[in-house]
Image (tube, grey):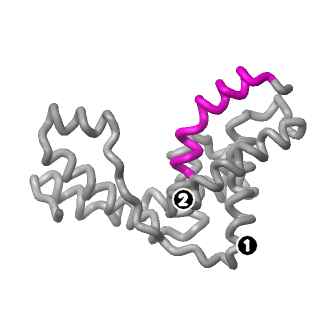
Amino acid sequence: AGDARAFERLYARHRGALHRFLVRQTRDAEFAGDLFQETWGKVIAYRDRYESRAKFRTFLFHVARNCWLDALRARGRDVTWAAQTIEPDDAMIADVRTRGPESLVVAHVAGEKLREALGALPEAQREAFLLHEEAGLTIEEVANVTGVGAETAKSRVRYAFSKLRAALADQRDAVAAGETTA
């Protein structure tokens, strides 16, 4: 209803999950930033369409998904997997200080493998996985945002987990053995 403080609280609560979802979905940090801004702009513009009986998070990710799909259509769905850079944050720096630089290398290699595995997933499975894991949506909310039945959403998340586990098994075994491929 135009309350700036309420918007600031919503923004603070959801900005991280939304940004991570968009970065991993688009695979392009700059493109994700544009979609992030567009999503929040549309949330403000469409605030009268939000029904308080639905979770705001579901509404937010529905808007974000629509922005993403509109952008895909505008680009002719020609979006390529872009390499993601990992900028060290305070937690990462603290981890290096407490556990040593090898932990940063292991985390970096694992992150690269995860990004590769996510990129190899079919789009519907990647989207369901990211909405469930990155955004923290329930299966029912994932179904609502993506416009499919709950069982379909559940299957997509389950298949994504299965494929990611298989793709990351070698990396997990190497880490357990104390090896890295960096």
Mark 2 and mark 1: Cα distance apart in space: 18 Å
Q: Amino acid at mark 1?
A: Arg
Q: Residue at x 61, y 41 (%)?
A: 138
Residue drawn where x is 58% and y is 49% of the image:
131
User: Who is closer to the viewer here, 179 or 163?
Assistant: 179
Q: Is residue 155 visible?
A: no
Magenta span: 3-21
Where does the N terminus fall, quadrant-wise?
top right
Instruction: Give the secondary structure at mark 2.
Output: helix
Q: Which mark is residue 150?
A: none
Q: Main secondary structure of the magenta part?
A: helix
Which badge, 2 or 1, is on the more N-terminal residue? 2
Q: Return the residue nearer the eye: 179 or 91.
A: 91
Judged from the image, the secondary structure of the residue bearing numbered disc 1 is: helix
> Residue at the location (89% across, 36% down)?
48
Q: Is residue 135 left or right of residue 89?
A: right
Per the image, the residue denoted by label 1 is: 73
Residue toward you, 101 or 49: 101
Indicate yes or no whether the magenta region holds residue 107.
no
Residue at the farthest right position? 48
Relative horizontal placement of residue 22, taking residue 67 as reference (left or right): left
| Residue 173, percent from left and from top | 19, 58
Horizontal side, residue 108 vs residue 42: left or right: left
Q: Residue at x 64, y 32 (%)?
A: 11
Label 2 sits on residue: 30
